[in-house]
């Protein structure tokens, strides 16, 4: 049935003649073109998700964002700088970070943006970063554990850990613990951990935590993202009386460099990223919500998606596993009471 005939049947009445349509091939083409554009616009709006629009400033607050010379981390660092914070950009590559830092300073007008080397694949680098920061700053208001890698060929960190578990979980585990005194002293303060929906496919392999017996890059990634959630929930309980809120999130499937280590993901991203994947700015919104929203003060231990509390699988709510993972992580990174 032609479009005009269909519309006239349901919308054209004697009382409302303005709804009558003459039709023709040009009318059909225009109608379907407009409908397609509207559908695409609605899809893009849904894909990007909600935006954090509260204008609250954080002048004088101190923020650390890991892995922020590009992607979601860079968007978060930029927004923090725009709102008046002292921002520490913790990155592995000094030159790339410096380029991003200068851009952020230019866009935000905030000169209190600092470039610091942090290689999460090296426990020594983590300790050096924390030691330098603790000597430079008297406070830490917001820590954003953003850096991560996804599905690379099996490779070990400097300390001999499977790379994804080492970078995505252990590096941030040690970093957060070394900065806890500053977070407590600055309370109310916040820790935001980037996890992923991929955690639902994860399993903490107690008998092969380092993927030595077998290695599947996607299973290892899922394990590290599940570890992020278990770490978040355990830390939130430990700090429940310290006024340090700890939450984690799924940022969505985002146009970022996270896929750079896997050829299949790189091909998919190159072909479909602009059409299907969320922009880095869209991916940063839930991070900003958890880090900045005044209404989130005192709310801790949650997992969020699109700025809403999201349900967790039984594996992600396993407190016994969270306790085991914490003790195992302490052992692996050599965390002592003096730390």
Image: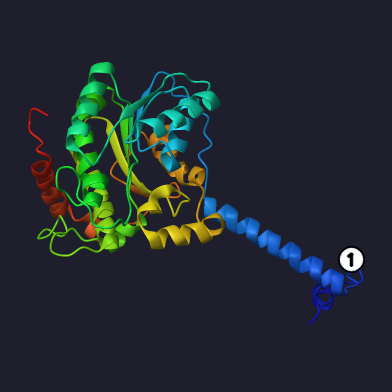
In the displayed structure image, the side of residue 13 where residue 81 appears, left or right: left
Locate the N terminus and report the quarter of the image it occupies.
Answer: bottom right
Residue at mark 1: 16
Residue sitting nearer the eye, 58 or 121: 121
Relative to 202, does residue 235 appear above or below in the rendering?
above
In the displayed structure image, the side of residue 229 where residue 209 appears, left or right: left
Q: Residue at x 26, y 23 (%)?
A: 133
The percent coordinates of residue 287 (x first, y second) are 41, 41
Q: Residue at x 34, y 56 (%)?
A: 311
The percent coordinates of residue 30 (x first, y second) are 81, 66
- In which quarter of the view is residue 138 placed? top left
Relative to 318, does residue 332 appear above or below in the rendering?
above
Relative to 13, does residue 145 appear above or below in the rendering?
above
Toward the bottom, the furthest residue is 1
Q: Residue at x 69, y 64 (%)?
A: 36
In the displayed structure image, the side of residue 199 where residue 273 appears, left or right: right
């Amino acid at each position: 049935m032609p479009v005009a005939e269909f519309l006239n049947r349901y919308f054209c009445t004697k009382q409302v003649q303005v709804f009558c349509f003459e039709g023709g091939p040009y009318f059909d083409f225009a109608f379907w073109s407009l409908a397609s554009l509207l559908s695409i616009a609605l899809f893009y709006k849904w894909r990007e998700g909600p935006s954090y629009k509260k204008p609250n400033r954080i002048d004088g607050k101190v923020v650390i964002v890991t892995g922020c010379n590009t992607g979601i981390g860079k968007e978060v660092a930029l927004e923090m700088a725009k709102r008046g914070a002292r921002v520490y950009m913790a990155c592995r590559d000094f030159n790339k970070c410096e380029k991003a830092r200068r851009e952020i300073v230019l866009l935000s007008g905030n000169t209190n943006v600092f470039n610091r080397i942090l290689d999460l694949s090296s426990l020594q680098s983590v300790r050096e970063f924390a030691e330098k920061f603790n000597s430079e700053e008297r406070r830490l208001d917001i820590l954003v554990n953003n850096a991560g890698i996804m599905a690379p060929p099996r490779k070990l960190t400097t300390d001999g850990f499977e790379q994804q578990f080492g970078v995505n979980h252990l590096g941030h585990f040690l970093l957060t613990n070394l900065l806890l005194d500053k977070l407590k002293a600055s309370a109310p303060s916040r820790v935001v951990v980037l996890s992923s929906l991929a955690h639902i496919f994860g399993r903490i392999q107690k008998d092969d935590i380092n993927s030595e017996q077998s290695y599947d890059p996607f299973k290892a990634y899922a394990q590290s993202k599940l570890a992020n959630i278990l770490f978040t929930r355990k830390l939130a309980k430990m700090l429940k009386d310290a006024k340090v809120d700890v939450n984690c999130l799924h940022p969505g499937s985002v146009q970022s460099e996270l896929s750079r280590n896997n050829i299949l993901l790189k091909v998919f991203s190159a072909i479909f990223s602009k059409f299907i994947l969320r922009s880095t700015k869209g991916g940063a919104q839930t991070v900003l919500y958890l880090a900045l929203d005044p209404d989130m003060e005192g709310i801790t231990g949650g997992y969020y998606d699109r700025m809403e509390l999201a349900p967790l699988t039984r594996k992600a709510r396993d407190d016994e596993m969270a306790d085991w993972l914490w003790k195992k992580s302490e052992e692996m990174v050599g965390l002592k009471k003096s730390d």
